[in-house]
Image (cartoon, rainbow, N blue to C red):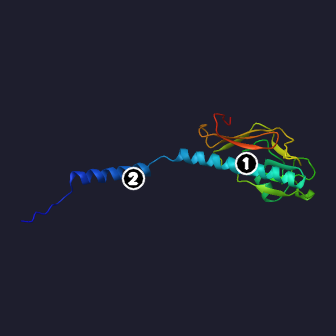
Amino acid sequence: MNKQQHGFTLLEVMVTLAIVGILASIAFWNSSDMLENNRAENYLLELKRNLNFARAKATGTDSLIVVCSGDTTRIERDRKVTCLNDWSDGTILVFHDANGNGDYNPKQGETILRVMEEVPDNNQLTFSGDSSLRFDASGRITSNPGTFIYCPNKDNENNKALTISQSGTALYNGDTANTCD
């Protein structure tokens, strides 16, 4: 006599439910914390690359190189740009400062060397030093050095720090308890 079995065994049902549970937890996992961490880290590492570039360019060309935040529309239109006091406003740019006044002016033969993405609206970037960083021909900073703090949201979680020394060396510090307030 041949018995046919219809349905599932208890073991098959339990294994299936376990697999569905694991897949559901992966699908509904809140990854915003990880995204904030990555966004803050990537932005500061990009800033570090630009600071290292500015320092190398200053020493390689025996000229004054400035890093600061400027009005995005003026940069896009290649107009004179005055450095802003707030590093979260506008776009961070690296330029050759031919006349040494700290402003970018294409009519005086100054050139923009690099431009970074704007800081997203709900994020903030602060700097404890001056409104601009000026690298001289020795690669040293002639303005006040300090620490950049990047806050990827307003709740002051996942903040990251980048320190720049008087010698022009940039050091990514990673997580910090400092805030952007």
- Front-most of residues 123 and 25: 25
Instruction: Check the picture and name the quadrant holding the C terminus.
Output: top right
- Front-most of residues 9 and 81: 9
Q: Residue at the far left: name it.
A: 1
Expressed as whole percent of the image width and height from the top left, the position of residue 169 reads: 78, 44
> In this orientation, does residue 25 appear?
yes
Q: Residue at x 56, y 48 (%)?
A: 35
Expressed as whole percent of the image width and height from the top left, the position of residue 121 reads: 65, 47
Q: Amino acid at mark 2?
A: Leu
Left or right of 169? Residue 29 is left
- Front-most of residues 104 and 45: 45
Secondary structure of residue under mark 1: helix
Q: Residues within 10 Å of mark 1 (few under 14, many from 20)?
A: some
Q: Residue at x 86, y 54 (%)?
A: 60
88 up-or-down from 115: above or below: above
Expressed as whole percent of the image width and height from the top left, the position of residue 157 reads: 59, 38
Secondary structure of residue under mark 2: helix
Determine which residue is flagged by label 1: 48
Expressed as whole percent of the image width and height from the top left, the position of residue 127 reads: 74, 39
Between tags 1 and 2, which lies in front?
1
> In this orientation, does residue 80 appear?
no
Q: Residue at x 92, y 53 (%)?
A: 98
Q: Amino acid at mark 1?
A: Lys
Determine which residue is flagged by label 2: 23
Q: Quadrant of residue 128?
A: top right
Q: Residues within 10 Å of mark 2 (few under 14, many from 20)?
A: few
Structural distance between the alpha carbons of marks 1 and 2: 38 Å
